[in-house]
Image: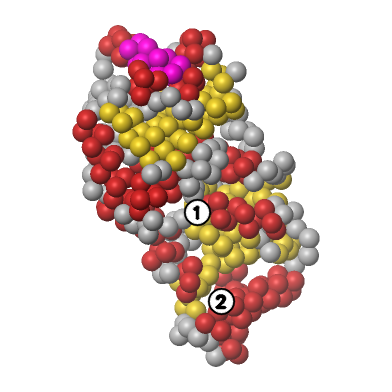
Amino acid sequence: MSISFNSFIKLGSNRNLSKAELSQILDSLRIEQVKYQDWKDYLLLSLGKNSQKKLVKKLEQTGSIIKFGNLEFKVGTSEKKELNNNLTKIIDGIFLKYLPKRQKQLKLSLNIRTDDDTQRTELSKEIRKIIQNISQEKRFPVKVLPTKKETYELTPFDYNKENLPTRGIELNLFVVKSKIYFGPTRWVTNPFKDIKQDEERPVRFFTHGTSIKLARTLVTLANIPYDGILLDPFCGTGTILIEALKQGMKVIGVDKDQKCVRSSKTNLHHFSEKYPSREKMKAKWRVQLHDSRKLTDAIQKKVDGVVTEPYLGPFLKHLPHFEEAQMTMKSLERLYTRVLALCKSLLKDGARIVFIMPEYNYPLKRSVYPNVKAICEKTGLTTLEESKFFNIKFPVEIGRKHNVVARKLFIFESK
């Protein structure tokens, strides 16, 4: 049965950041056009089967996307007989997939998304009835997992805690206007991996570290080829460097803080020890103690991209006076102009600089931030204005809204 959409993506809490990252992933897969629809906290997509397979592999490297799955059927909300027949077909296929594994029990989660609570209850009853009938026929017990009433689906923590990737499956039903789309989940982000990686790092600094998920997203947005060189001129504790290494890149880290350089090296050594070819991995990274305002004194080779969360000014619990904030931003503007100009001189043709800048927001809609237009005029760089897909405008705001310092993600390119 032909359908309008055959895939879905669940976006993260920062929808614009998720869309920007997904746009870059689809572009890297050389997809020229995407049919999509924004729906709740999801994107419904139309993708070729080959593109779906490639996308699933790429999602392991994503930092801001929550879930991906297939939509295998579409029926009208009034076509109850056809809905039941197709549901029976898909659920029977799930049983056939897991029967040969000789599991004691099949775990199954239902994600029914509709604004009509009565409709949700009816659909849930009908699906559970089908599951029970097939379970009795196959003599294969099934546990339908409970979901939270706020979201009507499992969180990524619960999904992985229940070991659904190997012990079961999630079935999704989306009621979009007068149509019901449904199909299984194929991939869900695993937050336990990031927690484990964070806890196992020998050195962590609250004020000098980019989050693992954000670092992964920044590396993706840089669009650096496999085995290309990534430069982080404010490397802190090395989080961005590690995420780039995980994606097959070579990395160079620079920081003028001796404590940060030691921390980066310690974390990178620890990361390298996990690999059988430790020495080969260690040869792929280099961290130097150096002032980024004199970057070219330390680095002569060309790089395939720059990704960094630079010094954003003093750590603040409260916003400073407006005049003080203006002085801070002027100082940061001079720093960023100098470093970005040097980064540009090290970039290969067509390469990007993914760069975060701060913004102080005051009452009466007053804001203080570095003058990006002036920075571009002095460095010869341009800023990416919009993502290839999904119409996401740059810069993209990142971080929590209640943070004292707002952060904005820019992508710079050479003219």
Quadrant for residue 150, please give it: bottom left
Is residue 84 visible to the viewer in this orientation of the structure?
Answer: no
Q: Residue at x 39, y 56 (%)?
A: 277
Q: Position of residue 130 (x, y in %)?
A: 61, 79
Q: Residue at x 55, y 37 (%)?
A: 223
Q: Which mark is residue 60?
A: 1
Q: Position of residue 241 (x, y in %)?
A: 38, 40
How has the structure been colored for display?
secondary structure
In the image, taking residue 180 as reference, residue 361 lies left or right, namely left
Q: Residue at x 45, y 22 (%)?
A: 343
Judge whether 185 appears above or below 263 on screen. Answer: below
Q: Amino acid at mark 2?
A: Arg
The quarter in which the N terminus is drawn is bottom right
The quarter in which the C terminus is drawn is top right
- In magenta stretch: residue 351: no
Q: Amino acid at mark 1?
A: Glu
Residue at the far right in the pictured view: 2
Majority secondary structure in the magenta region: helix
- In magenta stretch: residue 331: yes
Report the mark closest to the observer, 2 or 1: 1
The span shown in magenta is 329-342
Is residue 92 visible to the viewer in this orientation of the structure?
Answer: yes
Question: SS class of the residue under badge 1?
Answer: loop
Judge whether 1 appears above or below 195 on screen. Answer: below
Q: Residue at x 40, y 25 (%)?
A: 299
Q: CA distance from mark 2 to mark 1?
A: 32 Å
Question: Disc 2 marks which residue?
Answer: 128
Residue at the far left in the pictured view: 259
Q: Position of residue 52 (x, y in %)?
A: 65, 56
Quadrant for residue 297, please give it: top left
Q: Position of residue 138 (x, y in %)?
A: 59, 89
